Image (cartoon, grey):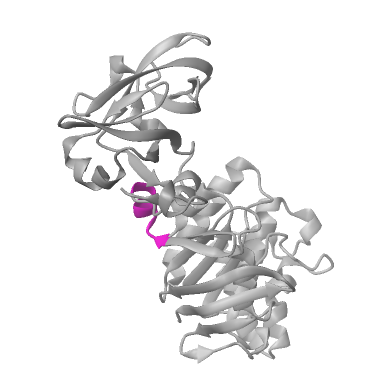
């Protein structure tokens, strides 16, 4: 088993920098997810680790070995691709065994490893079939099985669930999580889907424009984002953002704009003292915006008003899309709520759980104050 280190890794394609000074320490047996929008550099980072891309600067280390100049086949990694990459003319057994045959592994050992992997993945009955006879989910299991039989130090997954339907994605990501627990091997997994990242990862590395934005546990990323990008990317529906100004009136402090004036709890005053009179971004997640009729009694509630634009009944909750003159935002409210489109309503913000971002510290990606 082995950990992985990206040490000041830079990857350029001509004048374009795909990865900018990436420093990342993946612990042994960890399930690390690289997440971010298309073009953020996450797949390039994975391909640099696999040896499919040559890095421009820095070092990639697997275990205690620098692998910059090591051929992909000798890096002791196994990769599962989005496209499955199965040989169409081979059976499932032969697809899984192919890499071992190339390494001259004894026939009995090959059969033992393939059968063990097939049992682990529940595909024993498929071993004589060819890929065209399999569903998308079955093909993905075969691709994972082909990686398992190699018994690598590190498993790499490049958006392996993207070609599956929604129900099968949920089922397969649970299977991959259980597989990690069973194998106790280092998993590095790339996805653009933050829900996959949140549900599967030990830690998540959020990337944007080739830069690592934050590395942390799923819960810490959700509760304590470093900046506006992370706050908006992690969570579904995304965090709501309001352009506001910090004002002080006597002993009280508020954030306000043309539509809303929101009182800040006293314990947050000190953190905002230097921002009085300045523009900030107020952030609050949809689940912290409540219908007053069903709001928990324990919250620190601040009332605002808005107009209902769209409602989406989800069964156990309702997504209410709202409009004020300056912005649109969404609330996740109790399913007993009976809101009508076009109605002006009152809502309660949970001021025990909100965020302030300071654009003056980085106009392109404001830094979180808290």
Give the x, y percent position of residue 333. 39, 23
Give the x, y percent position of residue 312. 52, 22
Res 147 → quadrant: bottom right
Name the dominant secondary structure of the magenta segment: helix
Nearest the viewer among 166 and 223 is: 223
Relative vertical location of residue 304 with respect to residue 160 in this rendering, above or below: above
Nearest the viewer among 284 and 362 is: 362
Relative vertical location of residue 158 with respect to residue 222 in this rendering, above or below: below
Q: Is residue 221 magenta?
A: yes
Relative vertical location of residue 106 with respect to residue 173 in this rendering, above or below: below
Q: Is residue 210 left or right of residue 298?
A: right
Q: Residue at x 53, y 74 (%)?
A: 21
Q: Residue at x 45, y 11 (%)?
A: 339
Instruction: Write down the region rendered in magenta.
Output: 215-223
Give the x, y percent position of residue 342. 52, 9
Give the x, y percent position of residue 276. 29, 39
Quarter of the image that includes the N terminus: bottom left
Residue 120 in sight: yes
Relative vertical location of residue 334 with respect to residue 87 in this rendering, above or below: above
Q: Is residue 339 magenta?
A: no
């Amino acid at each position: 088993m082995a950990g992985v280190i990206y040490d000041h890794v830079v990857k350029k394609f001509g004048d374009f920098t795909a990865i900018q000074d990436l420093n990342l320490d993946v612990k042994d047996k960890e399930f690390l997810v690289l997440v971010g929008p298309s073009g953020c550099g996450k797949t390039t980072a994975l391909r640099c680790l696999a040896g499919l891309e040559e890095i421009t600067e820095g070092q990639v280390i697997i275990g205690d070995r620098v692998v910059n100049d090591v051929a992909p086949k000798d890096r002791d990694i196994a990769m599962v691709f989005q496209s499955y990459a199965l040989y169409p003319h081979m059976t499932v057994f032969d697809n899984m065994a192919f890499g071992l045959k190339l390494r001259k592994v004894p026939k009995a050992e090959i059969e033992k490893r393939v059968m063990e992997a097939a049992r682990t993945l529940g595909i024993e009955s498929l071993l004589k079939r060819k890929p065209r006879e399999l569903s998308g989910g079955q093909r993905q299991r075969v691709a994972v099985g082909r990686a398992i039989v190699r018994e690598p130090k590190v498993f790499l997954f490049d958006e392996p669930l993207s070609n599956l339907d929604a129900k099968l994605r949920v089922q397969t990501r649970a299977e991959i999580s259980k597989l990690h627990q069973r194998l106790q091997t280092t998993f590095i997994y790339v996805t653009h889907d933050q829900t996959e990242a949140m549900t599967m990862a030990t830690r998540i590395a959020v990337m944007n424009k080739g830069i690592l934005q934050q590395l942390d546990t799923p819960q810490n990323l959700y509760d304590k984002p470093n900046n506006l990008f992370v706050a908006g990317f992690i969570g579904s529906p995304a965090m709501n953002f309001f352009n506001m100004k910090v004002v002080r009136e006597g002993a009280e402090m508020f954030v306000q704009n043309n539509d809303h004036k929101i009182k800040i709890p006293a314990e947050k005053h000190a953190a905002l003292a230097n921002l009085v009179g300045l523009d900030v971004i107020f952030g609050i997640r949809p689940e912290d915006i409540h219908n007053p009729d069903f709001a928990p009694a324990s919250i620190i509630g601040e009332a605002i008003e808005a107009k209902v634009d769209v409602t989406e009944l989800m069964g156990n909750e309702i997504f209410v899309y709202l409009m004020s003159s300056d912005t649109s935002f969404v609330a996740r409210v109790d399913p007993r709520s009976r809101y009508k489109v076009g109605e002006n309503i009152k809502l309660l913000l949970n001021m025990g759980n909100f965020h302030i971002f300071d654009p003056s510290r980085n106009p392109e990606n404001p830094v979180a104050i808290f």
